[in-house]
Amino acid sequence: MDFINPLDILELNGRDAISIDNNEIKKAKKRLIADIELSEEGHYNYKGQSITKSDCERVINDLDIPEKKEFYSYLSTNKALNEYLASGDEKIFNHFHQDSIFKLQEFVTFISPYFTSRFEKSLFQAFSSQDTEQLILILRTQILISKSDINNAFRPISNEIESRIKEIDEIKEEIKEGESRYDEDDIDEVIGIIEDNFPADVLNLLPVYFQSQINKIATSINYLGLAIWNEFSVAEVPMKLVEHLLKLNIESVSKPTYEKNYSIYKEKCLEEIEIEKNAPILKRYAHILVESRKLNEAVDNKTTLPKDAARKINALIDVNDINNLESFANEIREQITFSVRGLAVSSWNVHNDINSALSLIDTAINIRNSPETRKKIAQDKDELKKLEIKYKDLFHCWFCGTNEPNKASAFTFTMYKETNRTYFPRRVQYSSLNITISRCPQCKEIHGKGSTNYWLVWFAGVGIGAFIGNLADEHYIIGGIIGLIIGHFIGNSMESGESQKKGIKSLATSSLSEHTVVSEQVKQGWQFSEPTA
């Protein structure tokens, strides 16, 4: 809508409305119409506008209304405002001052349509060029816009903001769908896009009319940051995005969430910086983690014994060294801890090697970790200790109670249990059960020496008994039997004595009865000697 001040085209401007009578207006009108009709162009050039005779007659008729006549008269004296309405000359913004007539609602209603059509263009230009000084000056004049025109005045900027929000949301969706043109190397470019599209110093100058859109901008930027974090696992970009949105004048219940996210991103960002600075150290421990996992796999597949794996782990990991690393190593520390813990679990579950399992869990528990992780590893150690107590006769050599047993040295014997007996005819039926007791090579050697002594004494007793029996009326058989019995008791005594001298349990039945498994069998009726009819 073009503004034409009839007093300008009638050359009656600068005059008080009361001083201009109707006859003077009529004479000026005739002169104007005649000039238009006689001109070659057939129109009147008004401040850059080409207006027709009908345009002139229309606005001149407004002077018949006293109120409008007064308004036009005022505008003819306020040249800056009059020029802005007619031609868009923005000098008004540098010289604007509030006159009392601006408080008159009728005047604002009259001027608003013309002023709004100019205002929206000026405001949009200042917003687009991010000219904050001009924006401030322009917004001072919004008092000349009526409520009915406020949407028209702000619509261009509102539409532009919505368009920019849509652009950001599209970038976010592309990242979430894995279809983004950005990758880890150039994702930081979105920071510049956000700063250019949503300059905080400009947006914060906008009136409350734009508050909901500013809140919406903050939401979009926050979701973009989350998408970048989830897809690329980099903290610096989302941190800077949220840092920017927090510069906006946000009035939203989500603001505490944004502040919390910023704190999280900042902490992660500092960790990333620390990690980058300490990359060589982390690379070394990453290698240790890989080797630990390989050992775990080998123990699971039974290609490596737990004790060998435990020895290699203790050679790989310097607990004091890894504990002295700063917080940047927290994650790798925890990964190594759980890898060693997994190796301990496999040592028990796959090999029943409680000693290696406990050795490995001790290594894991000595690594500095969060209270939660340390609590978990401590619980695992408690479980292993309970298993060690429950199966103590299986995990160590039972005879010495300290050395590690092996299958080649195990001691196996048979126990019997009578199942049926008849007297006519005399017959006995029984079951047999082979019992294996864990034993170390050292105890096996001691028992072997005692056994040798037993048989030497046994044979000597038989020989001596037979010889004496033969001298006594040739009863060598009886003498031999007596010698056998004496040799058996003396041999047993010497065999037990050899074990006692070395501080280990003997192979005597009284000693074997103390074994956990054997004692249970005895309680169930099993015995060491084979039942006879």
Image (spheres, helix red, strand yellow):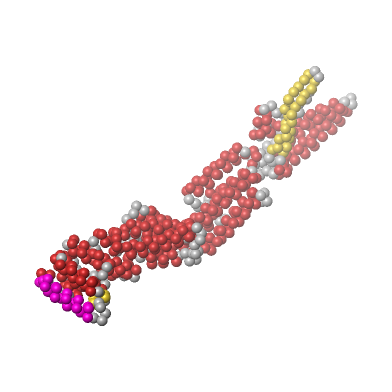
* Residue 275 sits inside the magenta stretch: no
Horizontal side of residue 497 vs 120, given as left or right: right
The residue stretch that appears in magenta: 19-38
Farthest residue to the right: give it: 474
Q: Nearer the viewer, residue 160 or 135?
A: 160
Q: How many marks?
A: 0
Image point (50%, 58%), residue name: 177
The answer to which quarter of the image holds residue 413 is top right
Depicted 377 relative to depicted 152: above or below? above
The C terminus: image quadrant: top right
Coordinates of residue 168 in the picture (x, y in percent): 42, 61
Magenta stretch: dominant secondary structure: helix
Q: Nearer the viewer, residue 22 or 169?
A: 22
Coordinates of residue 125 in the picture (x, y in percent): 32, 70
Coordinates of residue 207 in the picture (x, y in percent): 28, 61
The N terminus: image quadrant: bottom left
Depicted 195 relative to depicted 258: above or below? below
* Residue 35 sits inside the magenta stretch: yes
Image point (50%, 48%), residue name: 374
- The answer to whether one can see residue 320 in this image is no
The answer to which quarter of the image holds residue 319 is bottom right
Q: Nearer the viewer, residue 328 or 426?
A: 328
- The answer to whether one can see residue 22 in this image is yes
Coordinates of residue 22 in the picture (x, y in percent): 12, 71
Depicted 475 relative to depicted 346: above or below? above
The answer to which quarter of the image holds residue 57 is bottom left
Image point (11%, 71%), residue name: 21
Image point (53%, 50%), residue name: 366
Horizontal side of residue 234 vs 131, given as left or right: right
